[in-house]
Amino acid sequence: MAEERIILGIDPGTTIMGYGLISITGNKIRMIALGVLKLNKYDDHALRLKVIFERVISLIEQYHPDELSIEAPFFGKNVQSMLKLGRAQGVAIAAALSRSIPIFEYAPRKIKQSITGKGAASKEQVASMLIRLLDLRETPETMDATDGLAAAVCHYFQKGIPETGKKFSGWKNFVTANPERLG
């Protein structure tokens, strides 16, 4: 019997943090949970960081993930926003490190490309592909939740699938050749 591996994916943010957890057993992937942490009710930035840390610790204690996959901050025009986002990411990483969980970071374009085949895909395209890929019965409440889930699935696709030695010309070609990997 194949051993289960759990990946926690996080889309860091100081207003909303999205997260998703997936379970991998052999080549089967399934969603365990996804959601968001709404932080806009807290005025103090330091308090937001504390809440992020505590929520990540809570997710770790509840689901016992083997790895954390997190979206890297992207470079925007607003330096202050980027610094705050980097702090949010750092606090989530620190929470995982405090529990000795390995960290994997992926650029937003890499996550989108891994899920949809296009690095410039919209949040809606990523969510739509995840709904089909994981056979979700209902649409998640926000795109931030699916962004966290996408980080976890991206890590699975990057690290979790044994190399087959095959090259695929695109996402459709891969899916056609590997239906058993998609549940």
Image (tube, helix red, strand yellow):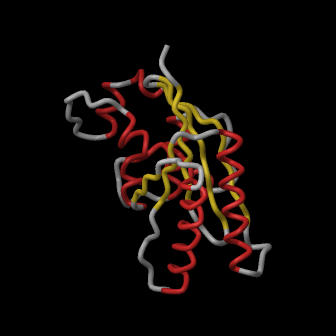
Residue 42 located left or right of residue 94: right
In the rendering, at what x and y percent does residue 153 appear? Answer: 47, 43
Front one among 127 and 150: 150
Residue 128 located left or right of residue 40: left
In the rendering, at what x and y percent does residue 50 appear? Answer: 71, 68
Residue 136 located left or right of residue 165: right
Residue 108 located left or right of residue 37: left
Residue furthest right as drawn: 41
The number of callouts visible is: 0
* Rendered view: 130 above or below 93: above
- Residue appearing at x 59%, y 69% in the figure: 88
Front one among 10 and 61: 61
In the rendering, at what x and y percent does residue 86 appear? Answer: 51, 73
Residue furthest top as drawn: 1
In the rendering, at what x and y percent does residue 23 appear? Answer: 55, 33
- Residue appearing at x 29%, y 33% in the figure: 173
Front one among 81 and 1: 1
Front one among 94 and 41: 94
- Residue appearing at x 34%, y 27% in the figure: 176
